[in-house]
Image (tube, helix red, strand yellow):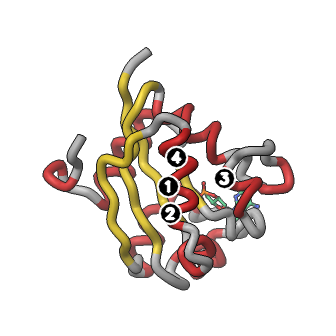
């Protein structure tokens, strides 16, 4: 197994309900280390660029509006097979399908307000980290 990095966002529904610490506890319990973290309020341009891959999807405009509706916490997570490990602890995109013990089962409100984002591949993790972090902001 290899040490990997993945990118995470704690979304506005979770920051609004003061769940950053509770979500970070689940991340750390899963063996992942938070090696970069900052609380930001995304601009519309940042949210549009980040979710550009979904630009043709019917939910794109609502998703962008939601992601700029409040602060988010962007994170770099490091650990063994971090991309897959974080996807496991996040749970399914739709909280109705998420397993017990996952972040989305515990906290998500809906498929849109689903509390967290995590990269879906090693390649996208590198791209997404670069959207929000410089290398000197990541301290392992
Ligand atoms: P995320 O992992 O951030 O990636 C894209 C997001 O789009 C996803 O989580 C969901 O929060 C959001 N989304 C909203 N509606 C849908 C939908 N119908 N199908 C998939 N994702 C959706």
Which residue is disc 4 drawn over?
27
- If the image is split into quadrants, where does the C terminus sit? top left
Question: Quick check: 87 above or below 132?
Answer: above
Instruction: Give residue 22's position: percent from left, percent from top.
Output: 57, 60
Q: Tag 2, which secondary structure?
A: helix
- Distance, label 2 to label 4, CA atoms, is 10 Å
Position of residue 68 measured from the top left corner of the image (x, y, whole percent): 50, 81
66 is higher (above) or lower (below) than 56: below
For image coordinates 60% across by 71% down, the residue present is: 14
Task: Using a 10 Å C-alpha cutoff, classify the residue at mark 1 as few (fewer than 14 neighbours), some (14 to 19) or many (20 or more).
Answer: some
Are the residues tagged 1 and 4 within 8 Å (C-beta)? yes
Q: Tag 4 or tag 2, which sits nearer the N-term?
A: 2
- Ligand 1 is within 8 Å of the C-beta of the residue at disc 3: no
Q: CA distance from mark 2 to mark 3?
A: 12 Å
Q: Which residue is mark 2?
A: 21
Q: Residue at x 56, y 57 (%)?
A: 23
Label pair 1/2, CB-CB below 8 angstroms: yes
Q: CA distance from mark 3 to mark 4?
A: 9 Å
Q: Nearer the viewer, mark 2 or mark 3?
A: 2
Residue nearer the viewer, 33 or 134: 33
Q: Residue at x 68, y 63 (%)?
A: 114
- Label placed on residue 103: 3
Label 1, label 4: how far apart the Cα atoms are: 5 Å
Q: Front-most of 24 and 44?
A: 24
């Amino acid at each position: 197994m290899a040490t990997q990095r993945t990118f995470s966002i704690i979304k506005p529904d979770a920051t609004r309900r003061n769940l950053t610490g509770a979500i970070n506890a689940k991340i750390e319990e899963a063996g992942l280390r938070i090696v970069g973290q900052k609380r930001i309020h995304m601009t519309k341009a940042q949210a549009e660029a980040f979710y550009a891959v979904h630009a043709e999807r019917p939910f794109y405009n609502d998703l962008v509006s939601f992601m700029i509706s409040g602060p988010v916490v962007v994170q770099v997570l490091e650990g063994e097979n971090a991309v897959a490990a974080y996807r496991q602890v996040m749970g399914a995109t739709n909280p109705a399908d998420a397993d017990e013990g996952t972040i989305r089962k515990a906290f998500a409100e809906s498929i849109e307000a689903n509390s967290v984002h995590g990269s879906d591949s090693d390649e996208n993790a590198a791209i997404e980290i670069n959207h929000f972090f410089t290398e000197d902001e990541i301290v392992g």
